[in-house]
Image (spheres, rainbow, N blue to C red):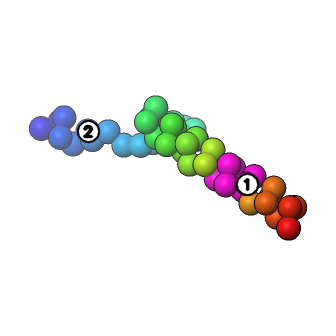
Amino acid sequence: MQEQEKQERGFVHKNGVTYFSKRTERRILFVLTMFMLVWGIFECSRDLF
């Protein structure tokens, strides 16, 4: 019963600090990397035209 109540969440906020699971951290970094890549391509292509 306790195992069902203790579901693995993406993050935990404890003592004023937010802790992320490894999977959540990787997802966030992947999304930010893709955003920066698209932004860089957009900025570069804007300078060409």
Depth check: 2 or 22 in front? Answer: 22
Q: In the rendered image of this protein, does residue 39 appear above or below residue 15? A: below
Q: Position of residue 44 (x, y in %)?
A: 81, 55
Residue 41, disc: 1
Q: CA distance from mark 1 to mark 2?
A: 43 Å
Q: Who's the residue at 27% across and 41% down the image?
A: 7
Q: Secondary structure at mark 1?
A: helix
Question: Alpha-carbon neighbours of circle 1 within 10 Å: few (<14), some, or many (≥20)?
Answer: few
Quadrant of res 4: top left
- The answer to whether residue 14 shows anywhere in this view is no
Pick the quarter of the image with the C terminus.
bottom right
Q: Are marks 1 and 2 in contact (CB under 8 Å)?
A: no
Q: Position of residue 47 (x, y in %)?
A: 87, 61
Q: In the rendered image of this protein, does residue 24 appear above or below residue 42? A: above
Q: Give the residue type at disc 1.
A: Ile
- The answer to whether residue 46 shows anywhere in this view is yes
Task: Residue at the far front: name it.
Answer: 49
Quadrant of res 12: top left
Q: Earlier in the sequence, mark 1 or mark 2?
A: 2
